[in-house]
Image (cartoon, rainbow, N blue to C red):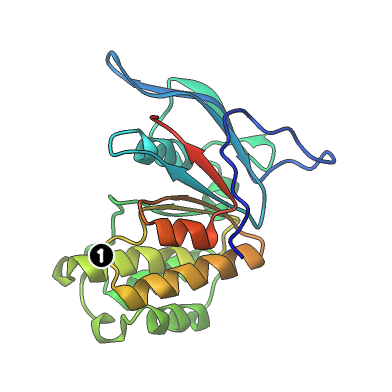
Amino acid sequence: MRPRTQTFRRHAHLEHGVPATLTVSGLTRKFGSLVVLDDVSFSLDEGRSLAVLGPNGAGKTTLLRCVVGADRPDAGKIFLNGAPMEETDPYVRASIAAALDDIDFFPDLSVIEHLELLAFAHGGDGEAVAEVVAELGLEAARDQLPATLSSGQRRRLALASCFVRPRRLLVMDEPEQRLDVRGRAWLTERIIREKAEGTAVLIASHDPELIDAVADERLEIGV
């Protein structure tokens, strides 16, 4: 049975007084006279997944960048567990794991060094690193520098960077890109596992099979 889906147009109220993991209210982003996001509102509870849908140029990436603090909206508010979200807040940085298309890596650290640093900096451990490296097939590239990786390997490293550290909110922009069939199957299973463990997942994707498999709600923008 596919997960129940729903298109959000307005901010969802709190249920039983418990704040949603992520709340976005009236988010607007403009670039000059171009309105990319216009009064976008939604909420996302723990253990739930919301898929952001829309044509190319609709503002999906901009929305995700605003959520993680990589871009600033012109209007609107973003809350994490009911509190205003500030990207510089240590709690926010410890709670959000993101895989965006423009993710940066430590250029002088190998794949394994990069992942171990992220894991230990956020209170993780080497066991989580070894597990994720094996799951994503990065063993052969573990000693390589990011600049020497293929585009597919870089994408898997970006995903691995999310899963080696603790997280309450997982934000991913087209994570299926440059993954083979096996990698996409792994990604689907991993997102389902994340939800089962209580992580809220915000994902932008053009893959209907992935969306049907993991999305509890859908947000259509730019339509």
Q: Position of residue 148 (x, y in %)?
A: 14, 71
- Quarter holding residue 9: top right
Q: Residues within 10 Å of mark 1 (few under 14, many from 20)?
A: some
Viewed as shown, does residue 55 lie left or right of 18?
left
Q: Position of residue 78 (x, y in %)?
A: 56, 33
Q: Position of residue 82 (x, y in %)?
A: 69, 37
From the viewer's perspective, is residue 35 above or below residue 44?
above
- Disc 1 marks which amino acid? Arg
From the viewer's perspective, is residue 27 above or below residue 86?
above
Query: In this orientation, which residue lies closer to the viewer: 67 or 109?
Result: 67
Q: Is residue 108 in view?
A: no
Q: Residue furthest left?
A: 148
Q: Residue at x 33, y 82 (%)?
A: 137
- The residue wearing badge 1 is 178
- Quarter holding residue 201: bottom right
Q: Position of residue 30 (x, y in %)?
A: 35, 20
Q: Is residue 29 in view?
A: yes
Q: Quadrant of the N terminus?
A: bottom right
* SS of the residue under disc 1: loop
Query: In this orientation, which residue lies closer to the viewer: 85 or 51?
Result: 51
From the viewer's perspective, is residue 125 above or below residue 8?
below
Q: Residue at x 73, y 41 (%)?
A: 19
